Structure formats: structure tokens, C-alpha cells
Amino acid sequence: MGIFERYLSVWVAISIAAGVALGVVYPPLFEAIAKLEVAHVNVVVAVFIWVMIYPMMVQVDFSTIKEVGKNPQGLVLTLVVNWLIKPFSMAA
């Protein structure tokens, strides 16, 4: 593991602290960022989520997708958790 992966929780904590501090020091910047919405989705948040997920997407071996049906337990478990359990646990 590289230094970034090894200390990921530290970087996250530093980022959260920096964001809170910047929000306290210069609120107009974050008010402007909050107004950047399309269909009730914050554009900045959407871009950063895409930046976070994209590296995982490019590592997917698409040639193995056709073999998903041969061993469906993982797929079924993922679908059940994401569509039947999580929405209701989040709502609760």
C-alpha cells in the first residue's frame, strides 16, 4: 500500500476539518457552491463522487460480466441488500 492508502482515514479527517474550517472562515464560497444544483443534485458533489468511483469502474473486467449468471449468489445478495434492506434501514 502507498502512503495515500495507508493513511486514508487521516486524509479524510484532514479534509473534513479543512472543509469545516473553510466554511467558518469564508461562508460565501460554500453558499455559492451549494447553489450549483441541477435537478436538486449538487454539481460539485456529483463531480467528486464521479472522481471517487471512476478508478473502480476502469478496473472492471467486462469480459467476465457474461459469467455472472453462473454463480448468482453474490449478485442476488447485492440486489437484496441494496434494494430491499438498505432503503428501509435508511428510512428508519
Image (cartoon, helix red, strand yellow):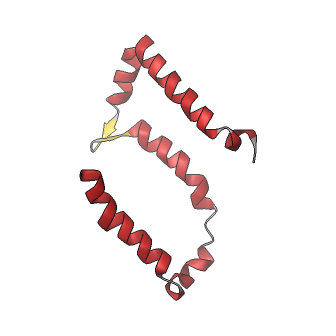
Q: Which residue sits at x=74%, y=39%?
A: 3
Query: In x, y percent, where is residue 23?
Result: 42, 19
Give the vertical position of 66 relative to 1 (above or below).
below
**Which residue ends up furthest to the right in the rendered image?**
2
Give the vertical position of 26 relative to 56 (above or below).
above
Say how many tags the image has.
0
Query: In x, y percent, where is residue 35?
Result: 31, 29
Q: Which residue sits at x=55%, y=83%?
A: 66
Query: In x, y percent, where is residue 91?
Result: 24, 52
**Which residue ends up furthest to the top in the rendered image?**
25
Give the vertical position of 21 relative to 53 (above or below).
above
Q: Which residue sits at x=48%, y=82%?
A: 72
**Which residue ends up furthest to the bottom in the rendered image?**
70
Left or right: 75 as drawn, with respect to 63: left
Left or right: 2 as drawn, with respect to 86: right
Q: Which residue sits at x=44%, y=11%?
A: 25
- The front one of 86 and 49 is 86
Query: In x, y percent, where is residue 49?
Result: 48, 46
- The front one of 55 and 80 is 80
Give the vertical position of 32 relative to 70 (above or below).
above
- The front one of 79 and 32 is 79
- The front one of 39 and 77 is 77
